[in-house]
Image (cartoon, grey):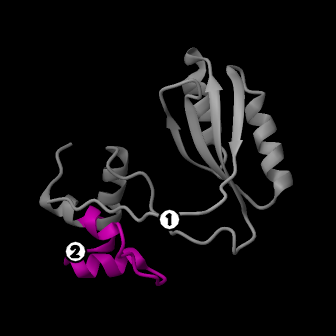
Amino acid sequence: MELSLFDKELLNYLQGNIPICSRPFAKIAAEFGTDEETILSKIRELKAAGYLRRIGTFFNSNNLGYVGTLVALKVSPAEIAPVAEAVNKYPEATHNYEREGKYNLWFTLLTRDSAQESNILNEIKNLPGVEDMLKLKSKKKYKVNVQFKLN
């Protein structure tokens, strides 16, 4: 799928302008001179084509009482895909990436408390192919806002 000018403008808009209201996509549609279903259909199409991963908000998880950690897994190469799929089934897991090196699958985990974190990590540690796990707690949090301008 090649991106149209409309697709690029919508992707640019979605990176930081989603309105906070009961029907944000209707409001976006009005700004784009179209209807809500066209916007929703285009978003589904862009997601299916891999241009859009998720639409969501950022919040300060620590202030809300959540526990976050970066997790590095050493997974046997033959089991990378099934382990990644299993990790992705946890709504608490985000940013799941395969990487080169000894620890070849990395993800972040955001849980309500340490007990939930321990339970999930124990389940993941016992998945077939998981050889080792590192929990990397942050000492200082840095937030980077990356937006891609599509022309």
Toward which corner of the image does residue 67 lie, by quadrant? bottom right
Question: Residue placed farthest to the bottom in the image?
Answer: 21
Screen quadrant of the N terminus: top left
Whole-Å distance between the Cαs marked 2 and 1? 34 Å
Few, some or many C-alpha atoms within 10 Å of disc 1 (few <14, some 14-19, many ≥20)? few
Residue appearing at x 32%, y 63% in the figure: 147
User: What amino acid is found at the position of numbered circle 2 in the picture?
Assistant: Thr
Q: Position of residue 11 (x, y in %)?
A: 28, 62
Up/down of 59 relative to 102, above or below: below
* Residue 1 horizontal side relative to residue 127, left or right: left
Quick check: is 81 in the magenta stretch? no
Residue situated in front as seen by the camera: 67 or 44: 67
Per the image, the residue denoted by label 1 is 143
Per the image, the residue denoted by label 2 is 34
Range of the magenta residues?
10-38
User: What amino acid is found at the position of numbered circle 1 in the picture?
Assistant: Lys
Q: Secondary structure at mark 2?
A: loop
Question: Residue placed farthest to the top in the image?
Answer: 78
Residue situated in front as seen by the camera: 120 or 69: 69
